[in-house]
Image (tube, rainbow, N blue to C red):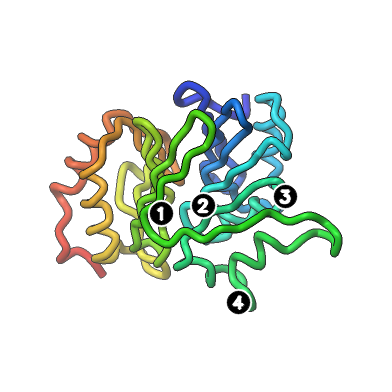
Amino acid sequence: MISTEISKGVYQVITGREVNVYIFKTSIGAALIDAGGDRKAADVLSALDELELSPYDVRLILLTHGHEGHAHGARVFAGAEVRLHEGDIGLAEPRGGILDVITKPFKRDDPVPAFRPLRGYEFIPFGERNFLALHTPGHTKGSVCYLSGDLLFTGDTLLNDKGFRIGHADGSSYPSESLILSARRLRDYLFYFICPGHGGVIKDGKIELYRLLEGISLSEAR
């Protein structure tokens, strides 16, 4: 099995770069949270095939931030609408940023995904699923977490690859003050599972987040 079902109709795929991609299977098609760094999205496509879905069934891609390891695979899904916070559009390749990477076709006449920037906190309905986009700056200027039911998808804001931890500021190995504050604000929401960008899914996520933040102060920010 390439994918693991973490909740009814929600699947985790660990891509070759150890980045988590999450697939939502709904009555109107599939939604992805992040798309991995492989520009051919091989692992994601294999997982979709396993779930009896095609690339054209992917209609929505919610990116947690603009780093290539999480965003580059979006370019494969020409039928999708891609959402990325406007604060991260300039990331990745220097000329046009991540937006050019995502929408650049393989050939001149190839279709490209649609793109709509996120500009703050937004409610995004999709079939029987709903997503709340929560702007959580700190890892990048435009980092976003997504809440859907009892699942909180945190990208690189919260990680579980070397134990449960707060991520780090872009270009640093330490959390920034804004990242710690973003993590604190997540405690205001109701969720049970934390689904990070790297590492395993965390049960009792809200309790674990409280425990994590008890030992972290703003003085530790760099």
Q: How many labels does the image show?
A: 4
Look at the numbered disc 3 and give the secondary structure of its residue: loop
Q: Quadrant of residue 172?
A: bottom left
List the residue tagged with mark 4. 94
Q: What residue type is labelled 4?
A: Pro
Could you tell me residue 74's position as x and y percent?
64, 51
User: Are the residues flagged by discs 1 and 4 in contact, CB closer than 8 Å?
Assistant: no
Neighbor class of circle 4 (other Cα within 10 Å; few <14, some 14-19, many 20+) is few
For the question of whether residue 194 can be seen, the reply is: yes
N-term mark: 1 or 3: 3
Residue at figure coordinates x 68%, y 54% from the top left: 113
* 210 lies left or right of 166: left
List the residue tagged with mark 3. 78
Residue at figure coordinates x 43%, y 49% from the top left: 155
Q: What residue type is labelled 2?
A: Leu
Neighbor class of circle 1 (other Cα within 10 Å; few <14, some 14-19, many 20+) is many
What label sits on residue 63 in the rendered view? 2
Specify the quadrant that holds the N terminus. Answer: top right
What label sits on residue 144 in the rendered view? 1
Residue at figure coordinates x 27%, y 29% from the top left: 204
Neighbor class of circle 3 (other Cα within 10 Å; few <14, some 14-19, many 20+) is many
Q: What residue type is labelled 3?
A: Ala
N-term mark: 1 or 4: 4
